[in-house]
Amino acid sequence: MKRKLLTLVLMALAIVTGCKNENDDEVTNIIRFNDGQFTLYRGYSYKYSDALETGATPFVINLLGEGVSYSSDAGKFIGTGSLVTGYFYSENIAEVKNGLYTIDIFSQKEINTADSCRVYYNYDFAQDTGKVYTIKAGIFDVVNLGRLMSYKIDIQTADFIHFTGEFRGTVDPL
């Protein structure tokens, strides 16, 4: 009897812990803000230059929304959609290292800061039309998950338009 009860308890525990909440994936890769939301699906990065006098190495990070892609032939973004971009100053010369990157509106280029951040929303890259939000405050929480990267986003403009969410996906070199 004890054996059957123990088996039932273990099976129930396995079922409960194995069940996935249907909302688990809904928040990942969705960026919400005052006027709406958009979905990110992939990232690109490149090392902008060697280490600066501050000891930081600048990397340009581009997180692409649905409808936007990178044309390697043209060397630019194409399509219509959203893009989150900025310079991230890492203490590592090879990659953006894990940590909190604070928006630095004074562009001091210190380690673990980010500047020149913008959010392009419903932007047509061929026509150069759409909404561009210049980011003035906030943080990016960067975590290397192995093959994937996580960028938790909590940023805002001078007009208090607040962007929040998380990108979790590949960030390929350009």
Image: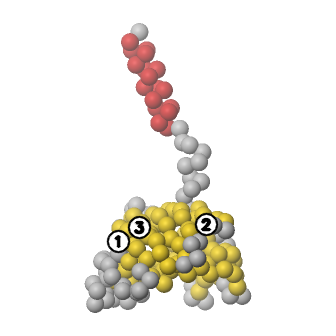
Circle 1 SS class: loop
Q: How many marks?
A: 3
User: Of the residues tagged 3 and 2, which is closer to the observer?
Assistant: 2
Q: Amino acid at mark 3?
A: Val
Question: Which residue is nearer to you in this view: 165 or 103?
Answer: 103
The residue identified by callout 3 is: 142
In this view of the protein, can residue 76 be seen by the observer?
yes
Of the numbered discs 3 and 1, the one sitting upstream in the chain is: 1
Tell me where residue 88 appears, x and y as whole percent: 41, 79
Q: Are marks 2 and 1 in contact (CB under 8 Å)?
A: no
Question: Which residue is nearer to you in this view: 135 or 166?
Answer: 135
Q: CA distance from mark 2 to mark 1?
A: 26 Å
Mark 1, Cα crowd under 10 Å, few <14 / some 14-19 / many 20+, is some
Mark 3, Cα crowd under 10 Å, few <14 / some 14-19 / many 20+, is many
The disc label shown at residue 97, or none = 1
Q: Amino acid at mark 1?
A: Lys
Tell me where residue 161 appears, x and y as whole percent: 59, 72
- Residue beneath the point at 43% across and 14% down: 4
Query: Quick check: 68 left or right of 116?
Result: right
Q: Amino acid at mark 2?
A: Phe
